[in-house]
Image (tube, grey):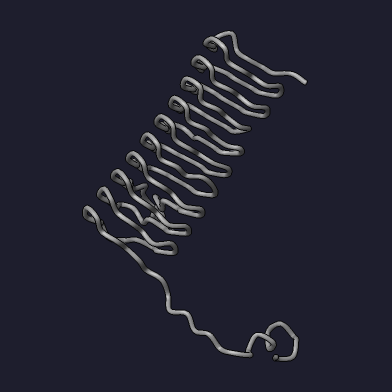
Amino acid sequence: MTTYIDSSVIIGQNCTIEPECVIKGNSVLEDGCVIESFSYIVNGHIGKSAVIRSSRIIDSYVGEGTTVGPNAHLRENSRVGNFARIGNFVELKNSTLGDYTKAAHLAYVGDATVGVNCNIGCGVIFVNYDGREKHRTSVGDNCFIGSNSNLIAPLTIASNCFIACGTTLTQDLANYDFAIGRPYVMIKPNRAGKYLKIPPS
């Protein structure tokens, strides 16, 4: 088991780098950070006491006390603030997330600016591409973005907003707005058997 570290990498005091990591380019590891096995970092700046769990970080910044991964991907020009949380299978691209903001799992944040103390739910997509051009989304502070929401850029969401799960948002939100958009659900009793090839109850 080996770890590869370029001679150009700067490593602070009391850092932990586990086996099977690759750290390249002009990367900086500040004091006390932990790089767990199978992480891949190129030109990444990892803040003090941050923890990187089996994740890929390219040309990006991770703040103090922040945790990333497992299996997260910070693509070019991403910046995560202090004491934030980027969880498993979360992808960031050309985006900034503020201090204490969390995207715990299975989300895509592309071409976005997100403020402090926000929650990005499971399955949230920042929809940044219309087929021809990329567009940005701006989110203020203290916002809740519910699971499986789609934010269709260009979009501006002010601070203290709540977006209910399953919402596809196409309009800007003002301070303290609540947004919910869900399709009508029709329930047909005793019809499942037709599709499941079992007799109805």
State which quadrant residue 115 falls in: top left
What residue do we see at 46% from left, 32% from top? 76
What residue do we see at 75% from left, 86% from top? 198
Indicate the quadrant containing the N terminus: top left, top right, bottom left or bottom right. top right
Relative height, residue 169 to residue 142 (above, below): below
Q: Nearer the viewer, residue 186 or 154?
A: 186
Indicate the quadrant containing the C terminus: top left, top right, bottom left or bottom right. bottom right
Q: Nearer the viewer, residue 192 or 25?
A: 192
What residue do we see at 61% from left, 32% from top? 53
- List the single residue furthest toward the left: 174
Relative height, residue 93 to residue 36 (above, below): below
Q: Position of residue 134 (x, y in %)?
A: 37, 47
What residue do we see at 50% from left, 35% from top? 74
Q: Position of residue 182 (x, y in %)?
A: 41, 71
Q: Position of residue 6 (x, y in %)?
A: 60, 13
Left or right: residue 179 compared with residue 101: left
Query: How many marks on residues?
Result: 0
Left or right: residue 166 compared with residue 37: left
Q: Position of residue 80 (x, y in %)?
A: 42, 32
Relative height, residue 78 to residue 118 (above, below): above
